[in-house]
Image (cartoon, rainbow, N blue to C red):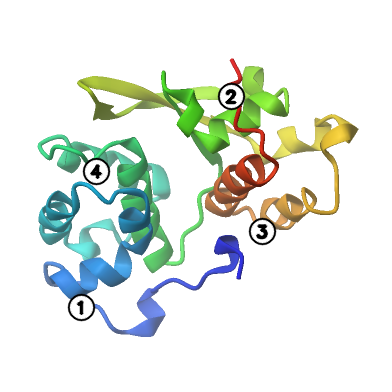
Amino acid sequence: MDITEEEYVTINDNIIDENKQLTSDEIKILFKDVFKHNHWYTKNIYKLGGEILLKTHKNKNFSEILESINDMANKYKGIGPLSIYDIANSIARYYNLKCKEIYIIADSNSKKKGPYNAIIKLNLKQKMRFKRKIGRINGQQLKLYTIDFDEFNNIDNKFKSKQFNKIYKYIRELDGDRCETFLCKWFKRNKLNEYVS
């Protein structure tokens, strides 16, 4: 199954009490993407997760949830921008919220950033808009950008393939997280991993 089609825990599943602090089992279920991306600082993910009271995020949009998690994560070593994004996304998904934009994290070590390099490869870098600084890696805050769904209507035909056209399904659904995941997988799958500047 493509990760972009995975099922996630939502409020409809009725397995997490949103009025209480998250338990370690609930953290493991809710933040499964975080654990996929961050194998080194799992203790700190559990500590941060234990501070989260879901209901405080119930009426927020994705950007507000991201801001809140970023503020909470600052005191924990090893919880960087991708973990912050994944935690915020897990909370948004829990409340059936979608990112209304595609979020892209830019890092000086861009070799590791599939979505960022995909945007560059697609000649869309100039279309990204700076949103805010997020997280810390080696003491440095990274830049978080957004890109509108409409920008993908203008990509070069050489990138348009049956495989790439899957992104338009997520664009029609206005699902920025699935678009971001798709870009990451597309970049890696097509062996475009050479550094692009």
Residue 137 pos. (x, y %) = 26, 27
Quadrant, the N terminus: bottom right
Instruction: Please tell me which of labels 4 and 3 falls first in the chain.
Output: 4
Quarter of the view holding residue 147: top right
156 vs 189, nearest the viewer: 189
* Residue 121 pos. (x, y %): 69, 26
Classed neighbour count for the residue bearing mark 3: other residues with Cα under 10 Å, few (<14), some (14–19), many (≥20): few
Residue drawn 60% across and 48% down?
Answer: 185
Q: Amino acid at mark 1?
A: Asp
Q: Which mark is residue 173?
A: 3
> Disc 4 marks which residue?
68
Between the C-alphas of marks 3 and 2, the distance is 20 Å
Q: Amino acid at mark 4?
A: Ser
- Please say if the residues under marks 3 and 2 sit with CB atoms less than 8 Å apart: no
Say left or right for 33 vs 183.
left
Q: Distance between the Cα atoms at labels 4 and 1?
A: 20 Å
Numbered badge on residue 17: 1
User: Upstream in the sequence, badge 3 or badge 2?
Assistant: 2
Q: Which residue: 66% across, 38% down?
A: 191
126 with respect to 48 (left or right): right
Whichever of labels 3 and 1 marks the residue nearer the N terminus, that label is 1
Q: Nearer the viewer, mark 4 or mark 2?
A: 2
For the residues labelled 4 and 3, the Cα–Cα distance comes to: 25 Å
Mark 4–mark 2 distance (CA, rounded to whole Å): 23 Å
Cα–Cα span, label 3 and label 1: 28 Å
Q: In the drawing, what numbered circle is on residue 128?
A: 2
Q: Position of residue 26 (x, y in %)?
A: 22, 73
**Could you tell me the amino acid type at mark 2?**
Met
Residue at 14% across, 52% down: 48
Mark toward the start of the polypeptide (4 vs 2): 4
